[in-house]
Image (tube, grey):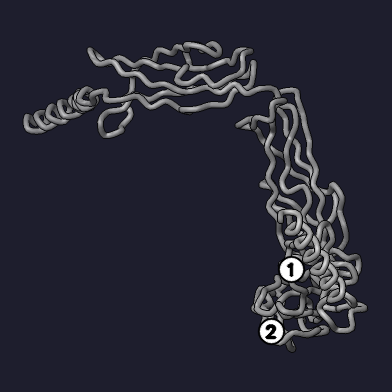
C-alpha cells in the first residue's frame, strides 16, 4: 500500500512540473525581430487595411504573449489593432506604418509602406486589335491610370467577351471557330471605390487562305545589289493571316534567301516573274510572283550617279533621256548635233581668246 502511495505522489509531481517546464521553455525565447504584414499596401482614399505583426526569435519562431504598439507618421490613421484608414492625400508613404514590440529590456520595430493611389480616370488595354486564328490564344493586359496617365497599383480587373471566343479571369482569350471581325468584343472593367471604368479591344479571326500579296511586284536594281521582298497571306476579305511560313525561290537573274532577300546576278536584263513565294495554310497553297529588272552600271549616261543628279539640274535625267533607253538619240550617248554644237563653242572660244590676245598687243 505504501508503495502505491509513493507511485501516485511521483506521478502527481511529474504532472505538476509539466506547465513549469513549458513556461521555462517559453521564457527561453528571446525577441530578435518583428515581422509586419503586408510590407506594402495599396489603400485608396478613405479605405482600410489591416496590418499584423509577429515578434520572432532568431530561429523565426513566433513568440506568444507579446504586446504590439501601432503608430503612423503620415497618410492616415491607425488604431491599436493595426487597422489603418487612408487619408485623402494621394501619394506613396514609405515606412509610414510602425509597430513596436518590447520584451523585458529588448525593443524591436518594423515598418510598412502605404500607397494611396490617385483617382481612377481611364483604363488602357493591350493590344487594342489582334488577329488570331481559330482555336489560338491571345493574352490581353489592362492598366488603370489616373488623369496624368500614371498606372494605379492594386486594382482588380474583370474580363468579359461578347462574341468570337472565350476569355478567362487573367485576360487570356481563346478564339472560337467562326471567322470574322469582332469589334470591341473584349471588355475589361476596373472599379476603384465608387469609380468604374472600362476598355475594349477588337479581335479578327481570319478565314481560309485566299491569296498572297508580294511586295514589291517589280523592282529595278543594278548587278550585285540586293532587294528585300515581303509577302502576306490573306483571306478573301484581304485580312492578313498571322503565323504563316513563306517559301522563297527564284527562277533566274540571281539568288534569294529564306527571308526574301534577293541578290542580283551579273547578267543585266528583265526577269519577269523570276521571284516566287508560296504559302500553305489549312491544306491550301497559294503563290505570288515578282519581276526583277537588272541594269548594268554602264547602261546609264555619263554624269549619272544613282541618287545624285550630277550636272542635270532638277531633272532625273538629261533631256530626251529615258533611263536605260536613249530615246531619239539613235543609240548614241549624246543627242544628235551635239558634236557640231561643241565645235561651235570651241571656235567661239578661240576667237574670243584671239581677240583678247590682240587687244593686249
Task: Tell me: residue 30, above or below residue 210.
Answer: above
- Residue sticking out furthest to the right: 328
* Residue sitting nearer the eye, 48 or 296: 296
Residue that appears at 53% across and 26% down: 41
In percent of width and height, residue 307 lies at 73, 63
Residue that appears at 22% across and 22% down: 27
Q: Which numbered disc covers residue 254? A: 2
In front: label 2 or label 1? 1
Task: Tell me: residue 77, above or below residue 207.
Answer: above
* Residue sitting nearer the eye, 63 or 158: 158
Q: Quadrant of the N terminus?
A: top left
In percent of width and height, residue 72 lies at 47, 12
Q: Residues within 10 Å of mark 2 (few under 14, many from 20)?
A: many
Residue 271 falls left or right of residue 111: right
Residue that appears at 82% across and 73% down: 343
Q: Residues within 10 Å of mark 1 (few under 14, many from 20)?
A: few
Residue that appears at 83% across and 69% down: 234
In percent of width and height, residue 17 lies at 17, 25
Mark yes or no: residue 274 visible: yes
Marks 2,1: beta carbons within 8 A: no
Mark yes or no: residue 211 visible: no
In percent of width and height, residue 331 lies at 85, 84
Residue to which mark 1 is pinned: 303
Task: Tell me: residue 10, above or below residue 277.
Answer: above
| SS at badge 1 | loop
- Residue sticking out furthest to the left: 2
Task: Tell me: residue 102, above or below residue 138.
Answer: above
Mark 2 → mark 1, Cα distance in angstroms: 28 Å
| SS at badge 2 | strand
Amino acid at each position: 500500500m505504501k508503495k502505491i502511495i509513493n507511485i501516485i505522489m511521483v506521478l502527481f509531481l511529474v504532472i505538476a512540473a509539466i506547465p513549469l517546464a513549458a513556461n521555462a521553455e517559453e521564457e527561453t525565447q528571446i525577441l530578435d525581430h518583428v515581422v509586419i504584414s503586408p510590407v506594402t499596401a495599396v489603400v485608396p482614399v478613405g479605405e482600410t487595411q489591416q496590418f499584423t505583426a509577429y515578434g520572432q526569435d532568431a530561429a523565426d519562431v513566433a513568440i506568444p504573449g507579446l504586446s504590439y504598439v501601432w503608430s503612423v507618421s503620415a497618410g492616415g490613421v491607425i488604431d491599436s489593432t493595426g487597422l489603418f484608414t487612408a487619408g485623402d492625400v494621394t501619394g506613396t508613404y514609405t515606412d509610414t506604418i510602425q509597430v513596436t514590440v518590447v520584451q523585458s529590456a529588448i525593443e524591436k520595430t518594423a515598418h510598412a509602406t502605404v500607397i494611396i493611389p490617385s483617382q481612377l480616370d481611364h483604363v488602357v488595354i493591350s493590344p487594342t486589335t489582334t488577329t488570331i486564328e481559330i482555336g489560338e490564344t491571345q493574352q490581353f493586359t489592362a492598366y488603370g491610370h489616373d488623369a496624368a496617365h500614371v498606372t494605379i497599383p492594386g486594382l482588380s480587373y474583370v474580363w468579359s467577351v461578347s462574341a468570337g471566343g472565350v476569355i478567362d479571369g487573367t485576360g487570356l482569350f481563346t478564339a472560337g471557330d467562326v471567322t470574322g471581325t469582332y469589334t470591341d468584343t473584349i471588355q475589361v472593367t476596373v472599379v476603384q471605390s465608387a469609380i468604374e471604368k472600362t476598355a475594349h479591344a477588337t479581335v479578327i479571326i481570319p478565314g481560309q487562305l485566299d491569296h498572297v500579296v508580294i511586295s514589291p511586284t517589280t523592282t529595278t536594281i543594278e548587278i550585285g545589289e540586293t532587294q528585300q521582298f515581303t509577302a502576306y497571306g490573306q483571306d478573301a476579305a484581304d485580312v492578313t493571316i498571322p503565323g504563316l511560313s513563306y517559301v522563297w525561290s527564284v527562277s533566274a537573274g540571281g539568288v534569294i534567301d529564306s527571308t526574301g532577300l534577293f541578290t542580283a546576278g551579273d547578267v543585266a536584263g528583265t526577269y519577269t516573274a523570276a521571284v516566287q513565294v508560296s504559302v500553305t495554310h489549312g491544306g491550301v497553297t497559294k503563290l505570288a510572283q515578282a519581276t526583277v529588272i537588272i541594269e548594268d552600271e554602264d547602261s546609264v549616261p555619263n554624269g549619272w550617279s544613282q541618287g545624285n543628279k550630277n550636272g542635270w539640274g532638277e531633272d532625273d535625267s538629261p533631256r530626251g533621256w529615258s533611263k536605260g533607253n536613249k530615246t531619239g538619240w539613235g543609240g548614241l550617248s549624246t543627242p544628235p548635233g551635239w558634236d557640231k554644237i561643241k565645235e561651235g563653242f570651241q571656235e567661239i572660244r578661240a576667237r574670243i581668246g584671239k581677240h583678247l590676245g590682240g587687244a593686249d598687243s
